[in-house]
Image (cartoon, grey):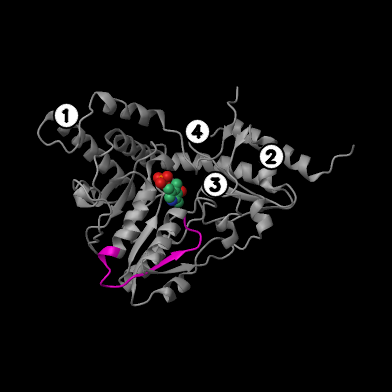
Amino acid sequence: MLKLPVYLDYNATTPVDPRVLETMLPYFSEYFGNAASRTHAYGWEADEAVEYARSQAAQLVGAEVKELIFTSGATEAVNLAIKGVLEMYASKGNHVVTCATEHKAVLDTCKHAEKNGASVTYLPVNNEGLIDLQQLEAAITGETVLIAIMYANNETGVVQPIAEIGAIARRHGVLFFTDATQAVGKIPVDVNRDNIDILAFSAHKFYGPKGVGGLFVRRKNPRVKITAQLDGGGHERGIRSGTLNVPGIVGLGKACELCRLEMEEDSRQVRILRDKLEEALLQLPDTFLNGSPEQRLPHVCNISFSNVESSVLMMGFGKNIAVSSGSACTSATMEPSYVLKALGLSDEMAYSSLRFSLGRFTTEEQVNYAIDQVKQGISQLRIPLNH
Ligand SMILES: *Cc1c(COP(=O)(O)O)cnc(C)c1O
């Protein structure tokens, strides 16, 4: 029996992998020590587990163990990166180059920085959701301290030309930060290949627990320094004070290891299912794929169904399939997605879009069911009923 609703919203969050949960459990009550307790075995055990998780995470993104800082998630990591760089490099300049389709964690942090006197350039994207590298390079001034461009977009799955962006940043002596929350664990990410200086990620987007994530901060070529945003006990090399979430970090580490070992096979399988779903839905008339068909994650598709409002469509099958209309973070307010608008969609086409994001536990049966549900919903809405 198919469990309903069928979950096709893996970009909002993923279930914890049972193997991750199993690894975490002893750290709630058996090995419950504070990783900062240096005077007894409870603390040593917790610290050892944290350092093991740090090495698992470092391996996934090609970093050195000492270059990873644990945080409460990507939102905190993004705040720490942008605010921390602006503060640390204030004497060098106060200009940031980012992009219109970034997650709110980045955009709202940039807005906050602007209120405090920073200047921010928001690069546009083309109709495939990609930034223009020449425009990026032209936006850099003598005041620029940071380029903040996401690895992969949460709404469309579009993957930016990260290595090229990193090369431009390096050439101009500007730091490059990427919000890689949707990419880490899904596609190969390598901070050295891609010239990334700072990178944010979050465990709950790749089968780890919620409320734990991390920030990669490069330690050589160049050595990046960021100003702490929380004052306290000086944990995490003084960059992020606060008692570590040991079970969460252990889960993050295990989730990283599983992704590293299984990414290739996972993405091969999920791509087949995504393509099947996408091909079936794009056969419907007046249906369009949003974002680059090539430069994107293997498990996401964002589709507009013209003349059908996705919120109305979801009233039909909302109890049967769990998908997202636009970003999960903006769907509370009924605004058309700013990401899709940046790709040039009209309000109407943005309102008629659905994001399908599949994952490790998606089955062919679930995909077939979703195709049926969407087709039924569309035909009911598009063809006027005869009474
Ligand atoms: C989910 C997400 C975030 C926020 O991550 P949290 O760990 O939930 O704070 C930031 N950026 C992107 C691209 C995301 O998908």
As drawn, 117 above or below 189: below
Say what amino acid the circle numbered 2 marks: Val
Say what amino acid the circle numbered 1 marks: Tyr
Say which of 242 and 180 sits in front: 242
Q: Residue at x 84, y 43 (%)?
A: 384
Q: Residue at x 45, y 59 (%)?
A: 107
Say what amino acid the circle numbered 4 marks: Phe
Q: Is residue 364 left or right of residue 106?
A: right
Would residue 193 be visible to someone looking at this image? no
Disc 3: which residue: 300
Q: Earlier in the sequence, mark 4 or mark 3?
A: 3
| Crowd rating for badge 1 (residues with CA inside 10 Å; few <14, some 14–19, many 20+) | some
Q: Which residues are magenta?
A: 87-103
Disc 1: which residue: 42
Disc 4: which residue: 361
Q: Secondary structure at mark 1?
A: helix
Q: Position of residue 227 (x, y in %)?
A: 25, 58
Q: CA distance from mark 1 to mark 3?
A: 43 Å
